[in-house]
Amino acid sequence: MEKGDKAFVVGLQNRQDLNGTTVNLLEWNQATGRWSARAVSGRREGICIKPINLSAVPPLDQVMVLAISASVRGGDKIMSQFTEIGIIPGQVSYELFMTFTSFMVKAYGNTMTEAKATEMLIEHIGKFGDARLVCGKLKKIASDANDMTRFGIVIPTLSAMLRMDTGKGYLELMIRLREGTIAHIRSQQAHLRRFKSQVQEIRVQSDDPFQAAMKRMCGREGSKSMSRKHIAEELAWAGMTGDMTIFGEEGVEEVKFDMILHRAYVKWLVQDVLPTLDPRDAKDGTLGKWHQVLHWESQLTGSVFVTRDRVFLDISDDFRIDPWIDGLVKFDLKTLESMPGVDADRRILRFFLFSEVAFKATLVALDEHKRQQKSSGSAREPVTGASANPVTVLEEGSKVIVVNVEADDDRYSEHVFNGMEGRIQSIVNGGEKYVVAFSNLENAQEIMGAHLARPAKVEREKMECRVCKEDANYLCVQCNVAWYCGPACQKADYKSHKKHCKLLSHDNMFDAMHSMTRDSDEHENYSGGESESEEDNYNDDKGDDSN
């Protein structure tokens, strides 16, 4: 260690009150063989201490990785400074924020504040720009809503939270902001639980193309899509009275929340969070790394994609959503109320979108079931391809999910849940057991072969090109109705389509061209907006060769 470094005091016998203190090293005394040091915060007296009683404070990025790993991923290498953090099975927690921010201030002194530590952690466990989404945009929206609606009346507790100067202030604000939206989804959960028990299979059937176009012209929603405007209106309407009645299995529950903060949160969700939804979030993003995302939610995440004006659920008419509904109704939404990071809000938004689609689909399935009972009584053949396929032989590198593990099975750690997705690292005893690596756990887990299954593939919506009638992967993002096999057919159809496109568009003045790529799981979009030339409607970087 060198002069100016920071270090932890450890192993003192006579001055045990100093153990754990962070100090700045001021001067090395060659004669005594001790460092002259001063505490970073709190006690300010100088102390002399032997090198054996000093432990170097690691660089900030190392501290962040170790702290999160210890708390979230259940790793073995837990620094002594983080032993007070409880091990949370596979996801980031409220306790992590509290401990981490206070530790950062203690370790780095005047160069670090709790507000700065909170921003750094939000960014580290989320996407690039998440700190700005929370500490910039959300803070302003919530503050403006509070100031305008309450006519300048200052509420000390709320004002302190809106400043978000501490990790605690940020999380207490998020709890209050999320209350109304989570209560609405919980109400939908209760309805789905009741209706789902009456039918065996549920699908989301596509609207007839003509009917879908007419619905959108009239401002109504399709079976597999919702406009941003409708999402905002639905959520705002749900919180109009500031309370929600939830008819749960254990009785009726009345939930009250702040209408002003609820509306501010809805505005932020639709305006700032919705555009950041990405089908790859669970597979390659931070969501799968720092959250306990089970198989059904991972499938759902990969099926939700966003255009400029709408959100689509990309699944085929034959795909059964029963496992997704089962997963949603069993999920404890209260765990998301205090969870730090914007990924928690992205999960809330996806749950809301799916609960709306699933509720309508369940009512359709219920009506169909009643009609079948009244007629011949013969039910249609069930369609397979839902959640998972049984496993016979697995190879190293195979993707698997955990199934049929009982809650009291002591062969597994508390970190192992049904529905967890992992990848086979090695085979034990010829396939009797497998060593499985999970993205949100530090250590691989040994799982019995009988408790593993292959993930089933989600069948995507099959769309037809307006011109050549081949499979279409390109959507006009202005009207969200016309599909094409590629830019060539869209250009050929431009003169015919532009009048309808203008009528169907939510924003006739839109002239900025956007595109999204669909590989195996995502749609690629080309704008069909009106312009002076056909070429103006296409992104030069997305030619035929690149697709």
Image (spheres, rainbow, N blue to C red):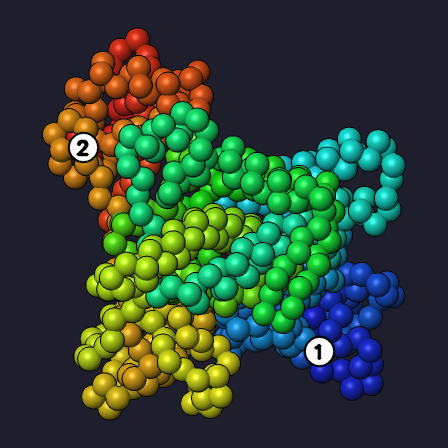
- Left or right: residue 501 compared with residue 267: left
Q: Which residue is drawn at 73% across and 35% down?
A: 145
Query: Residue 399 is drawn in which quadrant?
Result: bottom left
Q: How crowded is mark 2: few (under 14 residues within 10 Å), some or many (20 or more)?
A: some
Q: In which quarter of the image is the N terminus?
A: bottom right
Tell me residue 463's x, y (percent): 22, 39
Q: In this view, does 32 lie above or below 154?
A: below
1 and 2 marks in contact (CB < 8 Å): no
SS type, badge 1? loop
Q: Which comes sooner in the sequence, label 1 or label 2?
A: 1
Between 410 and 219, the residue placed more toward the observer is 219
Q: In this view, does 137 lie above or below 256?
A: above
Q: In which quarter of the image is the C terminus?
A: top left
Q: Is residue 134 visible?
A: no
Between 155 and 168, the residue placed more toward the observer is 155
Query: Residue 365 is drawn in which quadrant?
Result: bottom left
The residue where tag 2 is placed is 465
Which circle marks residue 322 in the picture? none
- Left or right: residue 74 compared with residue 251: left
Q: Residues within 10 Å of mark 1 (few under 14, many from 20)?
A: some
SS type, badge 2? loop
Q: Distance between the residues labelled 1 and 2?
A: 69 Å
Q: Which residue is drawn at 43% across and 53% down?
A: 363
Q: How many marks?
A: 2
Between 236 and 190, the residue placed more toward the observer is 190
The residue where tag 1 is placed is 10
Q: Residue type at mark 1? A: Val
